[in-house]
Amino acid sequence: MKPVNDWTFDNKIIAISPSLLNMNVYMLWISLFAEQRKNFIRIPNSHLSNEAALTLANLFEDYTGISITTNNLQFALYGIKEIVVLALKLKRPHYEIYRFLEFLSDNEYTKLIHLLSNERFGLRRVNFEYR
């Protein structure tokens, strides 16, 4: 329990090891904890100190190239279409991709299907008619 005690204080995570974070962790984190809001995806961060939340957000941007903001209560992710495209490129599990697709509006979904049907993308055989 020593690492847990060293990295937590007052029931909040105060330190994050960058060596433990990778694309798999971020994709799973979003698929498990993200909640739809009107114009963005919300991920609660009530168990993180401000410093740990900023570290997580900065490393997320470094790994994905997608912007994420944070405050004391939540992370806000505005690039869900980019997350879907990234998940497809990385060949993430279908349950994650379907979860990400649920966050898209009908208009965004249609635009994404049009983008993915483009020859250059090389994803013509993927069936997205799950809705």
Image (tube, helix red, strand yellow):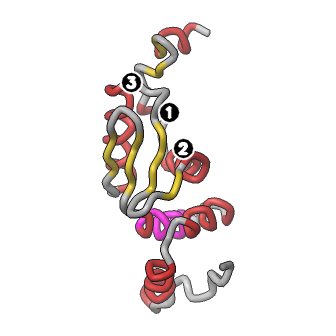
Identified by mark 1, the residue type is Leu
Residue 28 covered by magenta stretch: no
How many tags in the picture? 3
Q: Earlier in the sequence, mark 2 or mark 1?
A: 1
The kind of secondary structure the magenta stretch mainly shows is helix
Front tag of 2 and 1: 2
The residue that mark 1 highlights is 20
- Secondary element at tag 2: helix
| Number of the label disc, if any, that sits on residue 5 | none
Q: How crowded is mark 1: few (under 14 residues within 10 Å), some or many (20 or more)?
A: few
What residue appears at the point 41 percent right and 32 percent down from the top-left corner? 18
Q: Quadrant of residue 130?
A: bottom right
Identified by mark 3, the residue type is Ser
Q: In which quarter of the image is residue 19?
A: top left
| Viewer can see residue 117 | yes
Q: In this view, does 3 lie above or below 42?
A: above
Q: Which one is nearer the viewer's eye here, 28 or 104?
A: 104
Front tag of 3 and 1: 3
Cα gap from disc 2 to disc 1, whole angstroms: 8 Å
Q: What stretch is highlighted in magenta?
A: 82-90
Q: In this view, does 21 lie above or below 42?
A: above
Label 2 close to label 1 by CB (< 8 Å): yes
The residue that mark 2 highlights is 25
Q: Which one is nearer the viewer's eye here, 21 or 29?
A: 29
Q: In this view, does 117 lie above or below 42?
A: below
Residue 23: percent from the left, percent from the top?
A: 49, 49
Q: Which one is nearer the viewer's eye here, 129 or 6?
A: 129
The residue that mark 3 highlights is 49
